[in-house]
Amino acid sequence: MELFLAMLPLLLYYIIFNLYKLGYQKKDQCCYMLSYECHKAAEDQKLDPRSSARIISRNKNLGIEEYKFLLKTTVSSGIGEETYIPKNIIEGREESATLMDEISEMDGILFDTVDELFAKTGVSPSEINIIVSSVSLFSPAPSLTARVINRYKMREDIKAFNLSGMGCSASVVAIDLVKQLFKTYKNSFAIVMSTESMSSHWYPGKDKSMMLSNILFRTGGCSILLTNNRDWKNKALMELTCSVRTHIGSNDEAYNSCFQAEDDLGINGFRLNKDLPKAGAKALTMNLRVLLPKVIPLSEVIRYQISYYRNKIMKRPTPKDAGPGFDLRSGIDHFCVHPGGRAIIDEAGQSLALNDYDLEPARMALYRFGNTSSGGLWYVLGYMEAKQRLKKGDTILMISLGAGFKCNNCVWKVMKDLEDTNVWKNCIDQYPPKTLANSFSKILASISDESMNFTSLEDYLP
């Protein structure tokens, strides 16, 4: 007993010291977003209905059934008529893309957005300590980060990372990586570059599950400037408060739902199968079980637990549209959903019991810019800002889904009222449009085996 009493002060000191250390480390950890810049391609890269018709007509592998599928899927895809694709595809070289086509595509996106970051924030390239690129389908040597380092003559001790094969959720993976690095590198600046290489990945075959990628994926990307230097807090747009990564690749259905492969003719493509929405919903549910208790009030967590066990004891069925069970708006103000496609957006909306107002930014980003892979979330965020939805103190849940299968989500806190029209400049007042219909709906309505001349599909457009 006497020994215990003698040791008690030391034990209390040890506990207090570790609690203080934990609190100090938590206080010292921060991740501020200073700026983000989305890429808007040149007008000569715009995929209008006639350009789309010419590209479809060039594919000699397509028959009547494939044309019907393409038209029907395009009409219901949620994609508009002002998205962008690489120049080599516009020029008719989709089956003969060169390495220079890919490099030129990446340089155009990365240099454009990084130029804007430096111009807008006043941060010098020599001040960047960490740089991360997230491009799934293109990994050249020297790397993409090396190209940026060389262009801007960045410092010799910069920490460079290139993420490949991570799919549409790679941007949040990169953000989370920077957050972890900030624990070691104090008072640092980091750039995250998120985009996808499309120039050599246009699918010229006839496998329907692979043709979907041509309908959904478009040219675009974003660069983000982050810091953990508290002296920049007053200049920050947002602060990262939480990030959670979930990987369900051990599940075969989820793993195979989004897959790069060859079709029966040996043509490379990206297969998106019918299990994709289901995999997305499952990964999202698992992720939110970890994330939501970190961001919603304790009172809401307790209410949910009581309700859950009461329903379980009384054997009450859970309504299909009940959402996650939590009152999300008790801790979240805005929902930045990955614009991966109409089915993905709708599935996320149903899983979270979101309304049309919540899903409008994702639907409009998909309609105006298409699925720009890991860069897509930032067009959604840009829409929210351009519509002046984001006010000081608001919280934003970023929801990203990608091949593997992964769900990577994070929460941002808005540091000041935001109203930059960014990439939506000159067009934000036109959104949302009265209808999301496109020109191909008229072709679909009149198509018949006898009358359709597939070598002149362009003639069917109004």
Image (cartoon, rainbow, N blue to C red):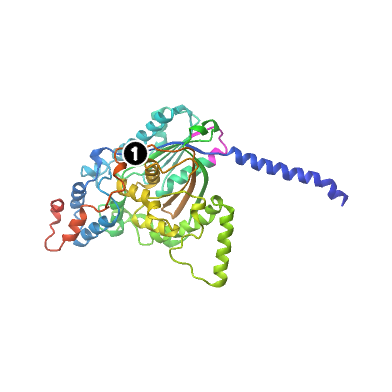
SS label for mark 1: helix
Q: Position of residue 214 (x, y in %)?
A: 28, 51
Say which residue appears at 45% left-offset and 27% top-offset.
Answer: 124
Q: Position of residue 250 (x, y in %)?
A: 48, 59
Say which residue appears at 46% left-offset and 27% top-offset.
Answer: 126
Q: Which residues are magenta?
A: 180-189
Q: Observer-nearest residue: 266 or 293?
A: 293
Residue 255 visible in image: no
Q: Observer-nearest residue: 138 or 74?
A: 74
Q: Quadrant of residue 428?
A: top left
- Taking the image as shown, residue 67 lies to the left or right of residue 191, namely left
Q: Quadrant of residue 143?
A: top left
Q: Observer-nearest residue: 60 or 211?
A: 211
Q: Position of residue 338 (x, y in %)?
A: 40, 50
Q: In the figure, 276 relative to 236: above or below?
A: below
Q: In the figure, 207 relative to 88: above or below?
A: below
Say which residue appears at 46% left-offset and 57% top-offset.
Answer: 283
Whether residue 260 is in magenta: the answer is no
**Amino acid beneath label 1:** Val
Q: Can you identify the residue that label 1 sits on?
A: 423
Q: In the figure, 89 relative to 273: above or below?
A: above
Say which residue appears at 57% left-offset and 68% top-offset.
Answer: 310
> Which secondary structure type mostly characterizes the magenta part of the structure?
loop
